[in-house]
Amino acid sequence: MKKSTFLVIGGAGYIGSHLVKALIAQQQQVVIVDNLSAGSASAVLGGELIVHDFDDRDFLDKLFSETEFDGVFHFASQIVVSESVKDPGKYYRANTAATLTLLEAMRDHKVGPLVFSSTAAVYGEPLHTPINEQHPTNPLNPYGRSKLMVEQMLADFDRAYGQKYIALRYFNAAGADPQARIGENHEPETHLIPLALQAISGKRPPLQLFGRDYDTPDGTCIRDYIHVDDLASAHILAINHLINNGKSGIYNLGSNHGYSVSEVIHTAEKVTGQEVPLTYAPRRQGDPASLVADASLAKKVLGWQPEYTSLDQIIQHAWAWEQTRT
Ligand code: UDP
């Protein structure tokens, strides 16, 4: 890739920080804008970090006048599904309206292209599995709707103003930097793998297993876990696709392989050599039984090839990261 300058909004967060790491490994110039409401400055392994809200038109006008960007990645969003149900205004403001501010500023300053973090939550309860991008979208909560609305805005902005974009629908981001420099660090943490590992290390209470009565082989939910470094590599392929005049589009990012919650727990026990302290809880509201990606489009069009395909390895990396924090 030729030397370029990229803007990474939300680059101090879990997935964004892994993209920043990958970009600086390729000697790219990187500017990170993050208000550190969820991210952490120590997760930014290089580039120039500007601590600021991106939802500020004056700030964006100044940024885009001062620096010429070859592409923008937008990771900054609110991600807790249950909170989105209780406080939808926060989600439509932070995820949807704020992104409109960004899109308008990019349009007016002729900045692009854009790679946007979307989610498998746009599909809702799957009608078939694995899920490809043609599957109907019917998000079950404001979080998923706030992301789907952005996808719709992106398509409209492309049609009207020729702004190129790729929306990447992540399945379950997992794992950490193989060198354990950065990893998952949400507060509150709601995700299965860090909660299981932190229950082992005694940092959190026993893991609550949500639901054993799903229509799956062992009764627990099935998800598709994809290594965060593989998500990062897909972003670089996506921006290059657009820079090289490829078409706008939407791509699933997953491993095409589902693991049940029980399988994840067993793998965590195998990797750590310790039992996951566990309690059984009722189903969590809005959890589909099974979400598995058909990610063949990203492989075919973008040339994406995930590197860390075993759940063992994903959990090994997450565990190594977890141990740096105890
Ligand atoms: N899960 C669980 N206990 C937890 C957190 C998650 O049993 O404390 C289950 C959850 O019901 C889902 C799977 O683990 O089936 C993955 O959940 P996570 O929140 O990690 O990701 P999601 O699929 O909701 O994006």
Image: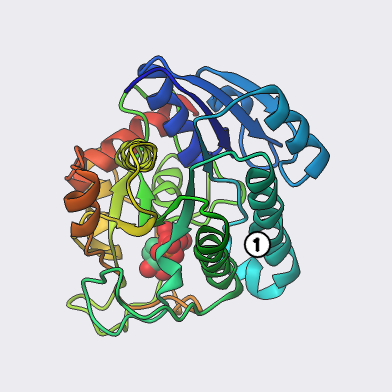
Residue drawn at (62%, 25%) of the image: 41
**What amino acid is at disc 1?**
Thr
- Quadrant of the rendered image holding ligand 1: bottom left
Q: Residue at the location (47% across, 50% down)? A: 164
Of residues 16 and 106, the one drawn nearer to the viewer in this rendering? 106
Q: Residue furthest top?
A: 27
| 223 relative to 34 in the view: left or right | left
Q: Image quarter for residue 303?
A: top left
Residue 170 visible somewhere in the drawing = no
Q: Please state the horizontal and vertical placement of residue 105, each as a whole percent of the image.
A: 70, 45
Estimate the x, y position of residue 4 in percent, counting from the top left: 45, 22
Looking at the image, which residue is at 27% across and 36% down? Answer: 316
**109 and 130: which is toward the camera:** 109
* Left or right of 250 on screen, residue 75: right
Quick one: SS at disc 1? helix
Q: Residue 42: image x %, image y %?
A: 58, 23
Q: Quadrant of residue 28?
A: top left
Asked whether 66 or 313 is in front, the reply is: 66
Let me know if residue 50 appears in the view: yes
**Where is residue 260 drawn, in percent x and y?**
25, 66
On-image quarter of the N terminus: top left
Q: Which residue is mark 1?
A: 96
Does 144 sit above or below residue 101? Answer: below
- Image quadrant of residue 216? bottom left
**Up/down of 183 relative to 304, above or below:** above
Q: How packed is label 1: few (under 14 Cα within 10 Å), some, or many (20 or more)?
A: many
Q: Is residue 131 left or right of residue 184?
A: left
Does any atom of ligand 1 lie closer than 8 Å to the CB of label 1?
A: no
286 over 21 or under it: above or below: below
